[in-house]
Amino acid sequence: MPLLEVAGLRAGYGAVPVLHGVDLEVEEGSNAVLIGLNGAGKTTTLLNLAGLLRGSGGAVRYNGVDLGAMDTAERVRRGIVLVPEGRRVFPALTVAQNLRLGAWPRRRDSRRVNVNLGRVFELFPRLHERRDQLAGTLSGGEQQMLAIGRGLMASPRLLLIDEASLGLSPKLVGQVFAAVRRINAEGVTVLMVEQNAGVLGSADRAFLMQKGRIEYAGKGSEMLQQETLRAAYFGD
Ligand SMILES: Nc1ncnc2c1ncn2[C@@H]1O[C@H](COP(=O)(O)OP(=O)(O)O)[C@@H](O)[C@H]1O
Ligand SMILES: [Mg+2]
């Protein structure tokens, strides 16, 4: 049984439909990528999975349970954690305060909070160095690390990451992708949304989204080799 099963998902904003029947499955322990051009519906998909945007049709099952109308807090409690597009760190709070806010759903388990904090600082030593610095003064790459670290503080089982590479230098993109690979290797199932095809080589599973539908699903490395897809997506 896949950890996440999305079948015929429809969603939109008001009367404007965006997702026209999305099908995808993510196996526990895998590293999946949802890739597509701007406006394809990738963020809309993640918002729905996080419980922040209602669907208008189809079904989403997680760990065999229909998520239906389950609210965001309950999804987080069950391990579905979103690292949102645009990072959304709290600029006037310190790095450490931002991280502790990420642990809010687990706040009663202070031992776990401290273990998670240590894990985040080990994964991102830069955040440890800057733990007392205001998040608003961090570089874009450091803010992205903080956004991912904040997600880890909630003890995710399924981590949804929306366009972590956006606006970062190639070197920082490499660092962020390497950190995500490590998080996955340590047992967290990952679904990344990306426009950066550099992520495909290391993805167990890749889904190409166009205009609110999945047009192709396969191994990341296979997707890179599909000539027609390359033409459609990369324009070569
Ligand atoms: N809050 C919103 N209200 C209305 N339309 C929206 C809203 N957010 C996104 N859209 C529209 O939904 C479509 C898909 O957007 P999105 O899911 O953000 O795409 P992606 O993340 O793949 O770039 C786009 O046409 C976009 O204009
Ligand atoms: Mg988006």
Image: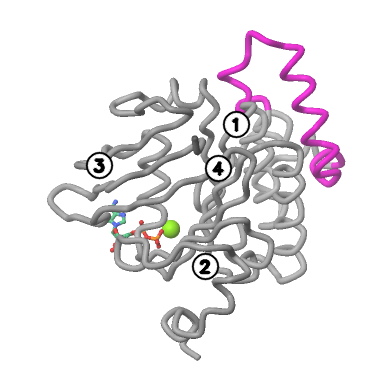
Respond yes or no on whether mark 2 lies under 8 Å from ligand 1. Answer: yes
Respond yes or no on whether mark 4 lies under 8 Å from ligand 1. Answer: no
* Region rendered in magenta: 100-129
Task: Identify which residue, 216 or 110, lies in the foreground.
Answer: 216
- Image-based side of 235 in relation to 222, left or right: left
The residue at which mark 1 appears reads as: 157
- Based on the picture, tell me whether residue 123 belongs to the magenta stretch: yes
Q: Main secondary structure of the magenta part?
A: helix
Q: Quadrant of residue 175?
A: bottom right
The residue at which mark 3 appears reads as: 58
* Amino acid type assigned to the residue bearing label 2 in the image: Gln
* Amino acid type assigned to the residue bearing label 3 in the image: Gly
Q: CA distance from mark 3 to mark 2?
A: 25 Å
Packing grade of label 3 (10 A; few <14, some 14-19, many >=20) is some
Rendering coords of residue 222 (x, y %): 58, 71
Q: How is the image coloured?
A: one colour
Question: In the drawing, what numbered circle is on residue 195?
Answer: 2
Task: Identify which residue, 94 or 200, lies in the foreground.
Answer: 200
Packing grade of label 1 (10 A; few <14, some 14-19, many >=20) is many
- Image-based side of 5 in relation to 28, left or right: left
Residue at 70% of width from left, 49% of height from top? 180
Q: CA distance from mark 2 to mark 1?
A: 24 Å
Rendering coords of residue 58 (x, y %): 25, 42
The residue at which mark 4 appears reads as: 27
Q: CA distance from mark 2 to mark 4?
A: 22 Å
**Mark found first going from the N terminus, 2 or 1:** 1
